Amino acid sequence: MQALLSTRKPFRQQHFLKRIIPLLALVISLGTSQTAMAQRYTSTNLTVSASPAGGAPTSTTYRGFTANPKISGADLGNGAEFNQAAGPGQGSLVITAASTTANDGGTRITSSAIYYRVYLQGAGIAPAFSRAFLNEAGTNGSIITHTATTSIDLLNQPSVLGGGTYTVEVYFRGEYDDAGTTGAFSDPASSNSIPPVGYKASFMVKTPLTTPSGGSSTWISTAPATGQPATAAGVGSGNTDWTNPGNWSNGVPTATSDAVIPDRSTGVFRVYPILDNPTYNFAVRNLTLVGQSNSSRGEITIEQATLRVYGNLRQNAGGLRGTVTLAPGVRNSLLNSTLVLAGADQIITGRLGVSDVIIAGSGIKSVTGELSASNTLSFQPASPANGVIVQSAYEDQTNGSVGPIFDTTLLTLINLGSSGKINQEPGFAETNASYVRGVLRADHAVNTGVMEIFGNIGLDINANYTSPQNLIVFRIVDDPLQSPTSTNGKVAVPIKRQYLVDNALDSENPSFSGATLSVVFHYLDSDSELNGIPEDNLLMFRSRSNGPPYAPVYGTLNTLNNTVARPGLSSLTRFTLTLGDRANPLPVRLTAFDAKRMGADVLVTWQTASEENSKGYDVQVSTDGKVFRMLASVPSANPNTMKLNSYSYLDTEKNKAGTRYYRLRQVDLDGKETFFAPVSVSFDGKVAETTLVAYPNPFNGFDKLHVALTSIAGGKGHLRITDMTGRTIRQESVELNSGLTDLSVNGLADLKAGIYIVNLTLPTGEVKNLKIVKQ
């Protein structure tokens, strides 16, 4: 029975339905035809005109309730395929519809429409129905005829993008007004369900040789394996030929279509494409390698071939690799595995390694995993003036949005390893407009007297020793470190480039005393990279903590070659180099300055991370914080050093009272002086006979912790350091003086950040406790 949606009584609905005489006709011209027969109507008919590829045109009439074929379930090509790419004369499925309805007294038919959708069988969720209204064409008494005003080409729906078997669903739906009560009726009745279901028919589209533009093709590898007959085709017997349309669900991908490489499904043996033709244009728009583990991921192997990717390249578990290098050290697309990132803005995920990588096209290529070029990394922008950039990044998925965000945490990077290098050919080298932004990594062994260029990343190193393991150099561009220098409140920012050197020998270790590195720091002279520093003012700085404090290590500037060279730099296990402003150097990097009351005396302490041309220090005191006088002069331990140095002075002047202010005056060898802010000490209150302090406190892994004690009696004591659970971290016997004892505590550099307790047992048996903080 025809479904009628209304609030009227059943007998009124039945009477109304008997008077409705609709006609739905779908005429498919220049191809095949399809119908959605309203089988509960008194009559329907549909004529299908088919012109499938390789077959003669046919015409078939379907009628609703007679012995003639019915439309639901029909194969519109009768086993033949339509050729979507054939052009005029083939491959269009055009729907036109007509309906006849009848008004019944006060009941008025207000509209008539058909709903349709087309989708690939087995592709998952079907798309929503589209609607085409049928306009009233004329009346014959109470009989109203409706016809379509548009033709619907089924082969060119958005979901029809290549070969396969498709389903088309159509249903008819009208609306009426019965004396102010509105309702709707449809055919078939199943179209009233949620989701609606129309009359169904099918047609087949011939798999194209190449994937239609905007479409997608999935690797299925059903072509026969090499040496096998055609009857052996099928999953598990396919070959690895990317160029064979039979290996793809929808033709061979092109630069304007997408490719999907599925993972290894359980119980399914699958071979994967191998690109091994250096003259073939392997190209794809978006490329996805499915899989979340090494054992199940989809794979592509690039041998002597070039793969061009114009869109995003997603392979969360990796899987794309190219390791053939028959022309080591040079870019060669005929002899080496080559990947070209050829589009505009692109995203590259997962770990990906190819011998030659070319950053081409335009925009920014965002690497959210690791992109390795084991032979050469080249730049070939579409516009040399506008350039092209590859950057380390991550994807921000906050609130469901996804976008590449610049990242310099070393978790994502471009990696040259021990054999890759940045191409120096004209037209393929880094420039001010085309470069690696963010993190670039290289590692090399160093040998005595040999200059290593670390893949042309911009830091050359000549060691006076042969390293037992590869030195690792990270280059970070466009993310400047914090200011390396500050004098009189004026900040000298660093350039937007630094090099982190790791795995070197430590010259502060007695076993490697005298180990040095001669370095050449390369930079781009772009306004962006120099960060506002006049090029003539560039000066090399070094940091041991990838941030302040810094020490100027100077170097010789060559503005013609864009380099700063520094010979004989002391070798450290891990350090960072950058360039700052020569106009604002700070010779001494003071990391700590303090003054603590020790009974009737005051212990003044300070610590330096480095010293340059430093003569010494004057300890000054004031009773009002304005007028200072000198208490003592303390010479520098070393006028020029990168080592950590700790200094102390005990103020034993008599009759201290009120508040005293202490400050430090640092003097260079050339007479230049620098003052460090005063610290106040109060002498109100009772004088303690025994006082225990630690400096610097808090301390970090580069500080040398000191424990100072003033005591009346000297003798043997015991020092113990525990964590907050009471676990002993370090303990030793110590010799305590009568008066001031300044103890240096070693072996705390590897402590985790947190709070610790110092217990000092005096010769008298008294125990003094003190909290210290490791940052």
Image (cartoon, helix red, strand yellow):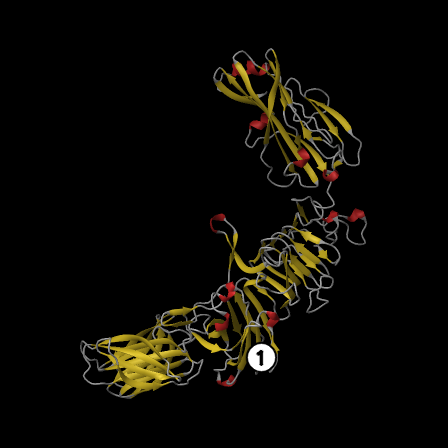
Q: Position of residue 230 (x, y in %)?
A: 80, 47
In depth, the one of 503 and 630 nearer the eye is 630
In depth, the one of 307 and 116 nearer the eye is 307
Q: Secondary structure at mark 1?
A: strand
Residue 5 appears in view: no
- Which amino acid type is marked by label 1? Asn
In depth, the one of 769 and 633 nearer the eye is 633
Quadrant where the N terminus is found in the figure:
top right
Please say if 377 is above or below 558. above
Q: According to the image, label 1 marks what residue? A: 462
Q: Position of residue 625 (x, y in %)?
A: 24, 75
Give the residue displayed 66% in from the left and 49% down from the top: 259
Q: Residues within 10 Å of mark 1 (few under 14, many from 20)?
A: many
Give the residue displayed 74% in from the left and 47% down from the top: 246
Q: Position of residue 233 (x, y in %)?
A: 76, 48
Residue 308 appears in view: yes
Count how many numbered circles sit on residues in the image. 1
Quadrant where the C terminus is found in the figure:
bottom left
Question: Relative to residue 490, is residue 322 drawn left or right?
Answer: right
Give the residue displayed 45% in from the left and 80% down from the top: 642
Kindly indicate the quadrant of the structure image that contains residue 77.
Answer: top right
Please say if 21 is above or below 494. above
Give the residue displayed 34% in from the left and 79% down from the top: 606
Q: Position of residue 734 (x, y in %)?
A: 34, 85
Question: Relative to residue 59, is residue 265 drawn left or right?
Answer: left
